[in-house]
Image (spheres, rainbow, N blue to C red):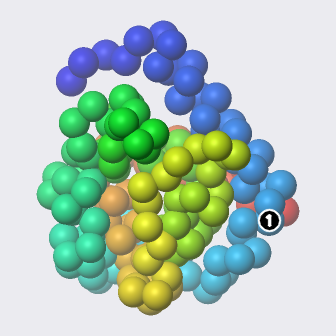
């Protein structure tokens, strides 16, 4: 795997910080059911998530969570290709609640002004449990150090509530 450049790391950290601040500021946690969570250690939830991911997500984000080619380069219409959900992408930089509402409500709803998102809303197609299961499946594929970093992001958001 190619080592990311300093600019990429700084950009990723900046995006993560903005996401954490935005999640706390917008009260995103209050719009997602608190009874549910993405538990990468729950084998049943992960298996359900894998099934749903393959049916609903893999066509854009890749069967192996690898994302689309050149996912950091804007397309002619201004959208970015679907990012990877493995450890090489930025999914793990975001708290679970933001990942949940972005999947449920679509990428445009929580994007900064002027950002064009190709992420559709799945709230009419998937249940909350299915969305949480997909997130559990994605998290289950991350190396343990990445899961731990993302868990710390979740903890910071919880402390800010």
Q: Residue 70, position in %: x, y?
A: 27, 31
Q: Residue 154, position in %: x, y?
A: 63, 55
137 shown above or below 155: below
Q: Quadrant of the N terminus?
A: top left
The residue lying toward the viewer, choosing from 140 and 116, is 116
Label 1 packing within 10 angstroms: few (<14), some (14-19), many (20+)? some
Q: Residue at point 44% right, 77% down?
A: 122
Identity of the residue furthest to the front in this view: 76
Identity of the residue furthest to the left in this view: 63
135 shown above or below 142: below
Looking at the rendered structure, the secondary structure element under dot 1 is loop
The residue lying toward the viewer, choosing from 103 and 143, is 103
Identity of the residue furthest to the top in this view: 6
Q: Residue at point 71% right, 77% down?
A: 31
The residue lying toward the viewer, choosing from 41 and 93, is 93
Total marks shown come to: 1
Q: Residue 90, position in %: x, y?
A: 45, 40
Q: Which residue is mark 1?
A: 27
151 shown above or below 137: above
Q: Residue 52, position in %: x, y?
A: 26, 78
Instruction: Specify whether residue 40 is in view.
Output: yes
Q: Residue at point 33% right, 59% down?
A: 138
Q: Residue at point 39% right, 86% down?
A: 125
Q: Quadrant of the C terminus?
A: bottom right
Instruction: Specify whether residue 47 is in view.
Output: no
The residue lying toward the viewer, choosing from 26 and 34, is 26
88 horizontally vs 38: left or right: left
159 horizontally vs 133: left or right: right
């Amino acid at each position: 795997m190619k080592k990311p450049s300093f600019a990429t790391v700084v950009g990723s950290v900046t995006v993560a910080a903005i996401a954490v601040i935005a999640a706390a500021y917008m009260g995103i946690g209050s719009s997602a059911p608190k009874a549910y969570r993405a538990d990468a250690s729950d084998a049943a939830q992960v298996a359900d998530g894998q099934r749903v991911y393959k049916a609903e997500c893999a066509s854009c984000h890749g069967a192996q969570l690898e994302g689309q080619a050149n996912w950091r380069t804007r397309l002619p219409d201004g959208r970015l290709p679907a990012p990877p959900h493995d450890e090489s992408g930025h999914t793990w930089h975001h708290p679970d609640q933001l990942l949940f509402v972005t999947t449920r409500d679509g990428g445009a709803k929580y994007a900064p002004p002027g950002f064009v998102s190709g992420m559709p809303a799945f709230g009419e197609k998937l249940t909350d449990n299915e969305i949480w299961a997909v997130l559990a499946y994605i998290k289950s594929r991350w190396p343990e150090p990445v899961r731990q970093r993302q868990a710390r992001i979740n903890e910071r958001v919880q402390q800010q509530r």
